[in-house]
Image (cartoon, rainbow, N blue to C red):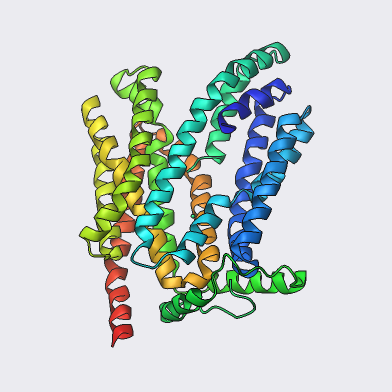
Amino acid sequence: MIIPLLSHHVKALGASPTVAGIVGSTYGILQLFSSTVVGSWSDVVGRRYSLLTCLLLSALGYSLLGTSTSITLFVLARVPVGLFKHSLSICRALLSDLVSEPERPLVMGHFNAASSVGFILGLVFMLPWSKTLADRSEANCSNNSSKCCHDQNYNKSVQNGSHTKGQPVVLTADTEASSRSSWKHHPRWRRVSLLQPAWRQLSSVSSRIHMVAFSDMWDLFLVRLLMAVAIMLYYSNFSLAMEERFSLKPKVTGYLISYSSTLGALSGFLVGPVTQLYRSNMPALLLHSTMLTCLLIFLYSTAPSVWQVVLTSTFFAISTTIGRTCITDLELQRGGVQASGTLIGAGQSVTAVGRVLAPLLSGLAQEFSPCGPPSLGVVLALAAVGLLLIRIPKWDQRVTKKTL
């Protein structure tokens, strides 16, 4: 409900396109650095306390945003939201604590579908307010082009787009069994360490982030980064490419994007059945979904007609939804459920890096062709496929040694 109206609000406050772009970038930068820290903090103090804190501070930020009467207050209102709007990541970590490993992909898929449907419904409820703010911005601003410029800059930075109590966590596959067994006796939802000194909480958070940074999970994070940038390149100049390649009107392109988004939301309900079909072999499912995504980006970049674009968009929404769930589940498998908040936060930070890189790479690729961004996305997806083909046999060896 809030994201589409931000451009109208900042325009009504008299912001220039440059200032609007800087304001929009503030949120993305804060999210980049706070995702891992807040996720690790939820491992230390417990899910309930961290979730309530994030919800309350985010509500405070939105309240300040609604009452802001100047650009300075608008920027200050975005600070608590940028630092603490991680309720979805903490909820994912909580779900990973509450469900068993075989059930986790099914539950995560349903949760992602529910959050996507919520985003779509938010756009519907936003419509009655959009005309009011649009009229207000037209009355207060003489620069009629600022809305378009701010929408572009803001969407680049805000795309949507992720407990132990004093015991260190070893982030390797060997600790997975002990992590699950300790979870059964100590649910993270009930473990709240409010009385811990601040310095002890900071020390615990730093140690967990250090373990994630120097763990043997670089391959998963690299695959996540490559695929995040590839998917963002697919969408980066979608409207412009449709207009230049097929003379498609923006309204029709909007319908196509809405169709793909709705299908992507509903695809979350397919994760469970597909996982059962693969017998919970998540590495194989991740490899096949990545290969399918790479193929679909290639078909889109070489599509001779609009109907091929519609076909690729249909399966692209499904493959990317399954791929995101797979890589999150693999991160939790290898890192251990005790560090789920840190791992999910780190994954969100990696995705945020992709949001920073994708606009730059897209701009460079568009200098050569409207199909340049998706073509570069094909190259990055192929690199992810090659990395998986090299690393998956090593993952299987670890699982074999563990079972022996």
Which of the 4 image quarters holds residue 201? bottom right
The residue located at (66%, 42%) in the rendering is 26
The residue located at (70%, 11%) in the rendering is 139
Q: Position of residue 14 (x, y in %)?
A: 73, 22
The residue located at (32%, 70%) in the rendering is 391
The residue located at (29%, 47%) in the rendering is 293
Would you say residue 353 is visible in this rendering? yes
From the viewer's perspective, tell me whether residue 192 is left or right of residue 231. right
248, 10: nearer the viewer: 10
Q: Position of residue 312 (x, y in %)?
A: 25, 37
Q: Position of residue 221 (x, y in %)?
A: 44, 62
Which of the 4 image quarters holds residue 213? bottom right
Picture layout, residue 171 above or below residue 370 = below
Q: Position of residue 212 (x, y in %)?
A: 53, 70
Picture layout, residue 96 above or below residue 336 = above
Would you say residue 171 is visible in this rendering? no
202, 270: nearer the viewer: 270
**Image quarter of the C terminus:** bottom left
Which of the 4 image quarters holds residue 73? top right
**Image quarter of the N terminus:** top right
Q: Please identify the residue farthest to the bottom as the structure is shown.
A: 404
Q: How many marks?
A: 0
From the viewer's perspective, tell me whether residue 235 is left or right of residue 28. left
